[in-house]
Image: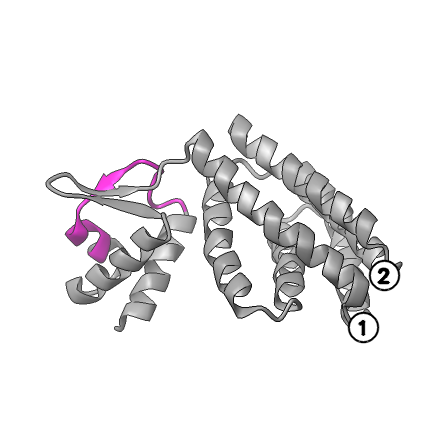
C-alpha cells in the first residue's frame, strides 16, 4: 500500500468518527486502525499534520486535531473566502447547463427527502450538497484554490462528523442551495454571494454551538 492509499484510509477513519477530536494515539495504533504498514503510515501522518488534521507531540504521541473555537472559525473563514467568490463567478459565467443540472438534482433530492427521511435519501442529500460546493470551486479553473479548498473541505467534514446531523438541517441546507442556484440561473452574482455567506455563517454558528 502506498502513502496515497494510507493517507485516504486515515482520512476515512477520521471522518467516520473512529478517532475523537483531541484523542492521543500512537503511530502503531493509527497504522493498525487504518490497516496500513508503518512506513506508509509515517508519510501519511506527515501529510495530515501539514493539513492541521493531527499534531505529532514528541514523547507523547499523535493528537487528533481538537475542534477548538479557533479551528472552527478559521476553517469556516477560509471556506467563506473561497466559496463566496466561487458562487459569484459561477453566477456570472458558469455554464447554464451545469447550473440547471445542479438545480434539478438538488430539487429532486429535496423532494425525495421531504417525502422519505430514510438513511439512504439523507446520505444522497449530503452527497448532492457537497457536489454543488465542489462544482463551483472546480469551475473557477484555479488549481491552487482547488487544492486548498479540498484540504479545508476535509476540516469542514471533520467538524460536521462531530456534530449531530438532523433531517431538518439537511432539508434547510438543500433549500438554501436551491435559492443560491436560482440566483446563478438568474445571473445575479450579488444575491448568490449574499446567500452563500448566510449559508456558511449558519453552518459555522451551529458548529460553534456544538450541535
Residue at point 36% right, 48% down?
Answer: 53
Q: Is-magenta flag for residue 88?
A: no
10 Å crowding of disc 1: few (<14), some (14-19), many (20+): few
Question: Mark 1 — residue?
Answer: 97
Q: Position of residue 131 (x, y in %)?
A: 63, 61
Q: Is residue 113 left or right of residue 41?
A: right
Question: Mark 2 — residue?
Answer: 185
Give the residues drawn in magenta, as a range: 17-31
Residue furthest to the right = 186
The image quadrant where one finds the N terminus is bottom left
Element class at badge 1: helix
Please tell me in which quadrant of the rendered image residue 197 appears.
top right
- Nearest to the observer: residue 5 or residue 124: 5
Q: Position of residue 92 (x, y in %)?
A: 80, 63
Please tell me in which quadrant of the rendered image residue 55 appears.
top left
Residue 126 showing in the rendered view: yes
Mark 1 to mark 2 CA distance (whole Å)? 10 Å
- Nearest to the observer: residue 188 or residue 158: 188
Amino acid at each position: 500500500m502506498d502513502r496515497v492509499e494510507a493517507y485516504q484510509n486515515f482520512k476515512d477513519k477520521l471522518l467516520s468518527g473512529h478517532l475523537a477530536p483531541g484523542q492521543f494515539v500512537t503511530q502503531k495504533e493509527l497504522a493498525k486502525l487504518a490497516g496500513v504498514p508503518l512506513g506508509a503510515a509515517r508519510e501519511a501522518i506527515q501529510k495530515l499534520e501539514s493539513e492541521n488534521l493531527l499534531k505529532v507531540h514528541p514523547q507523547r504521541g499523535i493528537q487528533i486535531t481538537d475542534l477548538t473555537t479557533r479551528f472552527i472559525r478559521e476553517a469556516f473563514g477560509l471556506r467563506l473566502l473561497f466559496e463566496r467568490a466561487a458562487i459569484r463567478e459561477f453566477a456570472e459565467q458558469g455554464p447554464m447547463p451545469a447550473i440547471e443540472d445542479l438545480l434539478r438534482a438538488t430539487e429532486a433530492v429535496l423532494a425525495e427527502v421531504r417525502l422519505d427521511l430514510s438513511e439512504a435519501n439523507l446520505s444522497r442529500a449530503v452527497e448532492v450538497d457537497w457536489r454543488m460546493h465542489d462544482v463551483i470551486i472546480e469551475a473557477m479553473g484555479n488549481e491552487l484554490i482547488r487544492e486548498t479548498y479540498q484540504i479545508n473541505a476535509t476540516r469542514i467534514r471533520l467538524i460536521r462528523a462531530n456534530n449531530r446531523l438532523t433531517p431538518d438541517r439537511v432539508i434547510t441546507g438543500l433549500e438554501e442551495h436551491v435559492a443560491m442556484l436560482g440566483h446563478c440561473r438568474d445571473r445575479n452574482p450579488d444575491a448568490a454571494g449574499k446567500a452563500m455567506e448566510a449559508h456558511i455563517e449558519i453552518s459555522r454558528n451551529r458548529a460553534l454551538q456544538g450541535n
